[in-house]
Amino acid sequence: MERLNFTHPIHLAVGLTLWSVWFVAVYSGLSVACAVTPPPPEAGALTLLNVGLGGFTLVCAAGLVLLAWGCCRTAKQHQGRQRFHAVVSGWLYLFSAFGVAFAGLPIIGVPPCL
């Protein structure tokens, strides 16, 4: 199967879709972990649960930034509609990366299961 180039219109929806999948996975995972085995409140914010979710957040944000960078590189090589798709997709990937980072900050700094 041939991979989709960054000029394909599907990339206009992929960034925000990845953000929404990350959001649902992280916060539902946090809720399930708190219902099953909550960490002790005196442990603070540095728990195994927060470290795992923070690492997952970091990986997702980095992946979205790499996708944005790939779109930017591809946009320089094309003109017209293909360039438009690559540029807008790149901005949407970058917007999604900032969304992941912004929504992930409470995971790192706030004790879980409050």
Image (cartoon, rainbow, N blue to C red):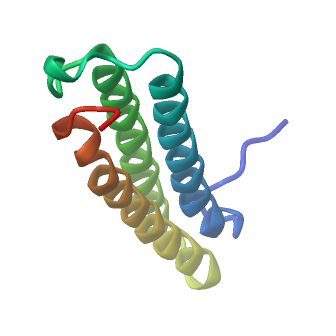
Image height check: is 78 above or below 55? below
| Quadrant into which the N terminus falls | top right
| Quadrant into which the C terminus falls | top left
43 to the left or right of 20: left
Q: Residue furthest right?
A: 1
Task: Give 100 or 48, whichever is nearer the viewer.
Answer: 48
Q: Residue furthest bottom?
A: 80
Please name the residue shown 55% across and 29% down the image.
Answer: 32
33 to the left or right of 4: left
Total number of numbered discs in the rendering:
0
Where is residue 88? Give x, y as percent. Answer: 49, 76
Task: Give 13 or 46, whichever is nearer the viewer.
Answer: 46
Task: Give 45 or 101, whichever is nearer the viewer.
Answer: 45
Splitting the image into 4 quarters, where does residue 66 fall?
top left
Q: Is residue 100 visible?
A: yes
Splitting the image into 4 quarters, where does residue 25 fall?
top right
Splitting the image into 4 quarters, where does residue 45 fall?
top left
Please name the residue shown 45% across and 65% down the image.
Answer: 90
10 to the left or right of 65: right
Where is residue 39? Give x, y as percent. Answer: 32, 17
Q: Is residue 76 visible?
A: no
Where is residue 85? Give x, y as percent. Answer: 59, 75
Image height check: is 88 above or below 111? below
Please name the residue shown 48% across and 38% down the image.
Answer: 26
Where is residue 58? Give x, y as percent. Answer: 32, 35
57 to the left or right of 44: right
Task: Give 21 or 76, whichever is nearer the viewer.
Answer: 21
Image height check: is 58 above or below 8? above
Please name the residue shown 46% across and 15% down the image.
Answer: 37
Image height check: is 66 above or below 84? above
